[in-house]
Amino acid sequence: MASARTIGFNRSGGGAGNFIGSFAEVGTADGVGMTTFGAPIQLKAGQNNYHLFNVSAERWGDYSATRVDPSSPNIFWTFQGYAVGNNFWGTQITQIIVPEPGGVVLLAIGMFGLAARAW
């Protein structure tokens, strides 16, 4: 029996103006150990550069998580950082609903209030 899978992550690159943003990919597990993921879905675009020129201070991923909702195996919550401003980050919280048999519905909750100066 197939089941939904979701991963959340940060990414940047691809030219000028592509700052660190939050993304997710939705996939389906076939029940025998193979999961096939679709194209990345941009949840929140980065808004500015983020670099401190200090390797120990640039720690993307410490506050990254994707979890299945206890109410349904087809609802996921992903919490991902994105670059808000020079040396500031924010948290994007997104609910991803994977209906049967295949589409994706997103409910994004931008949490700029959680933005903080890098440590």
Image (tube, rainbow, N blue to C red):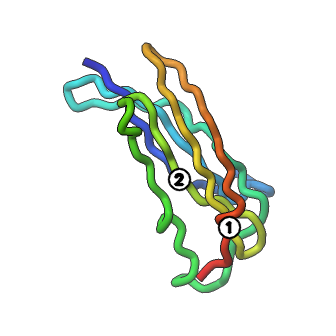
Determine whether the residue tagged by mark 2 lies in a helix, strand or loop: strand
Q: Residue at x 28, y 30 (%)?
A: 34
- Which numbered tag is attached to residue 79? 2
**How far is the residue under mark 2 from the one under mark 1?**
13 Å
What x and y, as percent, mark residue 33? 22, 32
- Which numbered tag is attached to residue 83? none
Task: Please say if 71 is above or below 79.
Answer: above
Q: Residue at x 75, y 68 (%)?
A: 49
| Residue most extreme to the front | 71
What x and y, as percent, mark residue 56? 52, 84
- Dot 2 or dot 1: first in sequence order is 2
Q: Which quadrant holds residue 113?
A: bottom right
19 to the left or right of 63: right
| Residue bearing the label numbered 1 | 115
Disc 2 residue crowd, few under 14, some 14–19, many 20+, Cα 10 Å: many
Task: Please say if 64 is above or below 45.
Answer: below
